[in-house]
Amino acid sequence: MAGSRRDFLKTAGLTGGLLAAGAALAPAAVSAGPSADPWDRVPEILARIVPPRFPDRTFDLRSFGAVGDDKKDNTKAFASAISACTAAGGGRVLVTGGTYRTGAIHLRSNVDLHVAAGATIKFSASASAFPAVYTRWQGIECVNFSPFVYARGQANLALTGAGTIDGNAQAGPWFDYDGQRGPDWDRLQQMAVDGVPVEKRKFGDGHYLKPNMIQFYGCRNILVEGLSLRNPAMWTVHPVLSENVTVRDIKIHSRGAMVDGVDPESCADVHIHHCSFDTGDDGTVIKSGRDTDGRRVGVPSERIVIEDNDYHGRWGAITIGSEMSGGVRDVFAQRNRIHQGSSYKAFYGLYLKTNKRRGGVIENIHVRDLSGGPVDRGAIFVDMNYSLTGPGFGDIVHPVIRNIDARDIRLDDSPFALKIAGSPESPLTGFRLADSAFTNIDIPKPQISNAKNVVISNVKVNGKPL
């Protein structure tokens, strides 16, 4: 059964972030009654999500020895400025006037790292610049390369500004790792099955599990706003086991494999809005841990609102999974748009993916006013038979998917409008598609297997009612 972030973080020894003084958890939102419109919950959820505020103090990075010449290593300058800011009780670390090369940046409580217009943070091309930290890699906890920007157990954190954070991943070793990670990835999965303690699952330098770009781990009160985020090695914005998260008005541009946009994992009270995604993988994708290890942690992602975003990238626009073993519930997505990208087409509009080793429950997913196209592989796809990796890692634990509601979906130019590939052992239960229209569809008839209580009402495909 899914647990709470509070209980898990106590067990993990994280005394900051969610457990910090003055950061008490708000009570969970009360579920709407059976006759209520679930969308009535959205204002209540958004009222819980309050971006952090910071004291009016500014710590100019250049005052700590930084030089924005795209040459000098400014890792120590970032660490010194952030340390001074948090020691003073918080404020803004200001990055302005140049391109600042650096290794890993570790944020601390009460710090707004502000990258002004015309300024760029550009990360090192050396793997040794990212020392190992406690993290999650594709849903499994381990010790691995530090994400480029990282915080663990902190409260009141922000990345803001009109400037750029450039992962510079193409210049580093990271994409070469894609073809070499197999043995490390197999080893990590086997460690999780064998119950190896997380601190003994050691990877990082000398191994091939590339790092995320921005990760907040066990943190509370987070804001990512305004920035252009480019060239990540892996997932771009990845809050884990965190609460009260706002991601707004950012632009993400990524190319390569495993370069998602925003990936809340085992998080609660998350608002992602007015962002632009031009990604080589999923745009917004909700996760909660993988297989044995995800069930061990057992913390769901819940109360997530995704609205007013533009998707120009590949794979799924609104995606859940495939790492969802802690559960995903109460997700609301509205007024999102899909476009032809600069070099990619979206593969799916709404995409739920899992398989028979995940376990976990996906429930109460609500999507409305999703429009645009083309959608290269399918408009709506629920896949409970998504790929199994590795030579038989872990037990068979069938996931559950129930209560999915999609309405006012208007997608164009796709092979199919709706496909549900449920599991024979655990059929999907409860799917409603209403008040929608799909145009230029190759296969008009819905493709549905191993699903119960599927209701389609007032839906047209190529101008004809279903």
Image: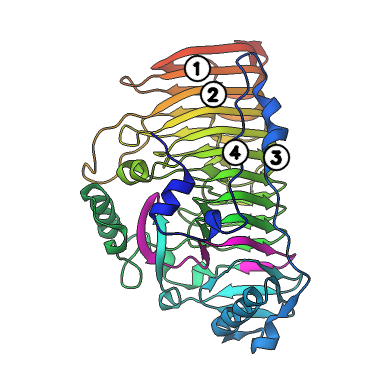
Amino acid identity at mark 4: Pro
**Residue 143 among those drawn in magenta:** yes
Amino acid identity at mark 1: Gly
Image spot of residue 181 (x, y percent): 32, 60
Amino acid identity at mark 3: Leu
Disc 3 vs disc 2: which is toward the camera? Answer: 3
Q: Residue at x 67, y 77 (%)?
A: 88
Q: Which residues are magenta?
A: 138-165
**Residue 168 among those drawn in magenta:** no
Q: Residue furthest front?
A: 21
Residues packed near mark 4 inside 10 Å, few (<14), some (14 to 19) or many (20 plus)? few
Q: Of callouts 3 and 2, which one flags the residue occurring earlier in the amino acid sequence?
A: 3
Residue corresponding to mark 4: 27
Q: Which mark is residue 404?
A: 2
Residues packed near mark 2 inside 10 Å, few (<14), some (14 to 19) or many (20 plus)? many
Residue 315 seen in render: yes
Q: Quadrant of residue 309?
A: top right
- Residue 412 vertical placement versus 293 (above, below): above
Image spot of residue 456 (x, y percent): 58, 12
Residue corresponding to mark 3: 46
Q: Of callouts 3 and 4, which one flags the residue occurring earlier in the amino acid sequence?
A: 4
